[in-house]
Amino acid sequence: MRGFEPATLCFGVISSARAFIPSAAAAVRTGDLGAFNDVLEKFGKAFERDRNYTLILRVRHNVIKAGVRRISTGYSRISLADVASKLQLDSAEDAEFIIAKVSLDPASSPVLSCCHARS
């Protein structure tokens, strides 16, 4: 009895992965979204050609989770604007959404508490 055999196209081109792996692994490990975006920009065309671009975009979430973990171990309290700055996100609202999502993961420790300044 033979198992499922994927198409040969799945094994076709791994040239982009070879150059991508060391720098992407470092970005995922450190949670450096800027470095990950640089690698994605540099090798994006190769990933599109290899039909791996959407797979690589899914790794972005792991980079962000690692960054949130790194921030949560270093700070007991930090503003969402500072989190957005450290993770190189566009806005504090993006940081709030991401932290809320990451805090649902049982393996993570960040706790989101919203305190709005009153004038």
Image (cartoon, rainbow, N blue to C red):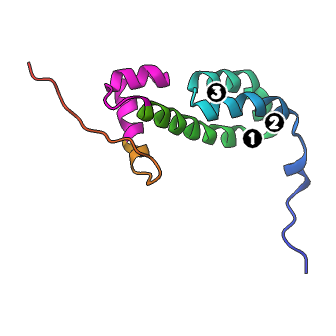
Q: Residue furthest bottom?
A: 1
x then y, percent, for residue 41: 69, 22
Helix, strand or loop status at disc 2? helix
In space, the residues marked 3 and 1 are separated at their CA atoms by 15 Å
x then y, percent, for residue 6: 85, 60
Q: Which residue is mark 2?
A: 17
x then y, percent, for residue 79: 31, 25
In space, the residues marked 2 and 1 are separated at their CA atoms by 9 Å
Among the 4 quarters of the image, the one containing residue 32:
top right
Residue type at the position of mark 1: Asn
Specify few, some or many for label 1: CA neighbours under 10 Å numbering under 14, 14-19, or 20 or more.
Answer: some
- Position of 44 relative to 51 (above/below): above
Specify few, some or many for label 3: CA neighbours under 10 Å numbering under 14, 14-19, or 20 or more.
Answer: many
The tally of labels here is: 3
Q: Residue 52 got which mark?
A: 1
Residue type at the position of mark 2: Ala
Q: Which residue is mark 3?
A: 36
Residue type at the position of mark 3: Phe
Helix, strand or loop status at disc 1? loop
**Closer to the N terminus: mark 2 or mark 3?**
2
The span picked out in magenta is 74-99
